[in-house]
Amino acid sequence: MKTKMILAIAFLAAILVLPSAASAMKGVGIVWDTEVEIVDSGATRCVQYGVYNPWSEDVTAELTVSDELKSVITNAESEAKAIPANTMHQNAIPIEFCFRAPKVYPENCMLGNQFCEQTCDMPEVTYSGKIIAIEKSSGSSGTGSATAVQTAVPLVLKVRCAAHGVDWTLAYVVIIVLAITAMSTVIYKRKKKR
Amino acid sequence: MATFLEKNEKNILIFLQVILIAAIIGLLTSSGTKLTGYDTLGSTSTVSIQNYISIARSANLTDGINFGSINTLPSWNTNATANYNSSNQSMYFISVSTDSNLGVDFCFKAVTIMSTSTGIQLALGNYTWSNSTLNNWTHPVFPGTSVLTTSYVAGAKNVPVGNNIYFRFWLNVTTGTSPGTYNNSVTFQGVATGSACS
């Protein structure tokens, strides 16, 4: 009787577990409310997207960009975050992607890279690509291919030119230092003479 | 020169003081970078539009696309192990979540060429696939309609919310292929319908 009971429980457990194992799905989703980002030339910018996981298995996700954007931005950085199973889009977990925009507008400099001005007489530069939510795959073993899924959304990066005149700060500092040095010398000599 | 300096000591000091004060005023009033900006006047209307898509792979696809052991060469159109189940359906599929508000276009690529741990490669031209929104004995169709490449290739388009896209994969192994375990990674990308693969 006891053995039959154990077998019955084992059978029921197998029935309950097998379908869920067979239907176990692993994936990632992305929420977006803009497809255009405006960023100053050479500036660092962080964009934020919601990443969600309405599926039955926990995943770890992070953001990256497509190759077109990878080739123009620098210092790209995103943190990987755990996205629990059954996280719907309303509860999407924000993930930041930070990068430095390219310096695309040449400056007119008087001395090396000092005393530069930016006149912004070039047309606005834009780059098109994608921002991608990646489900970080643990990979699989055996002959064949490990698989990964990702969701991607369009991103147009508009690099804005920030016009500015020549920055004379360094010149003023140098003049102040020279003037103070010269005044100190004159005063010192005068006191020494007396 | 020394006599000139001594005679005009007072004037020189005054001159230096003027220079110093002028430089300090210049430094304080210098704003350095002068930014230009945009200013908009008037009332504004605001609407926030949010899009969201999510896809997931089946358990078999999560386990990887496996071709088992191939012991007889050449071996043409070797089936991946989950191409046909007992009901002649493919167990490789990707679902578009019902928690999405757009249809999804699919793109695929191999991240790397198939190779052994010692670096012996198996050309991707030998690796073919088909996809379909139908899943039966004939669909996804045999033989593979596309060759796996390291660039994104478009697959099924506008797969509706809540639907699946099914796959089958085949591998050709020619005579003379070095023995070994060949691996690579395949990425399945879902994009909002109408977006290009990249």
Image (cartoon, coloured by chain):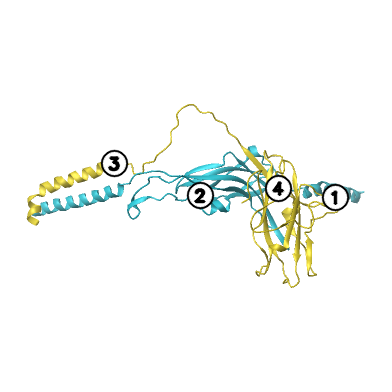
Chain colours: A cyan, B yellow
Give the Cα distance between marks 3 and 4: 59 Å
Residue B34 % position (x, y): 36, 41
Residue B87 % position (x, y): 86, 51
Classed neighbour count for the residue bearing mark 2: other residues with Cα under 10 Å, few (<14), some (14–19), many (≥20): some
* Label 1: chain letter: A
Classed neighbour count for the residue bearing mark 4: other residues with Cα under 10 Å, few (<14), some (14–19), many (≥20): many
Pair 1/3: label in front: 3
Q: Residue at x 53, y 44 (%)?
A: A47
Q: Which residue is mark 2?
A: A99
* Label 2: chain letter: A
Q: Which residue is mark 1?
A: A10
Q: Which residue is mark 4?
A: B56
Q: Quick one: label 3 or label 4, which is nearer the N terminus? A: 3
Do badges 4 and 1 share one subunit?
no
The residue tagged with tag 4: helix, strand or loop?
strand
Q: Quick one: label 1 or label 2, which is nearer the N terminus? A: 1
Q: Quarter of the image holding residue B122?
A: bottom right
CB atoms at circles 2 and 4 under 8 Å apart? no
Q: Which residue is mark 3?
A: B28
In front of the other: A126 or B17:
A126
Q: Residue at x 37, y 44 (%)?
A: A164
Pair 1/2: label in front: 2
* Label 4: chain letter: B
Pair 4/1: label in front: 4
The residue tagged with tag 1: helix, strand or loop?
helix
In front of the other: A187 or A10:
A187
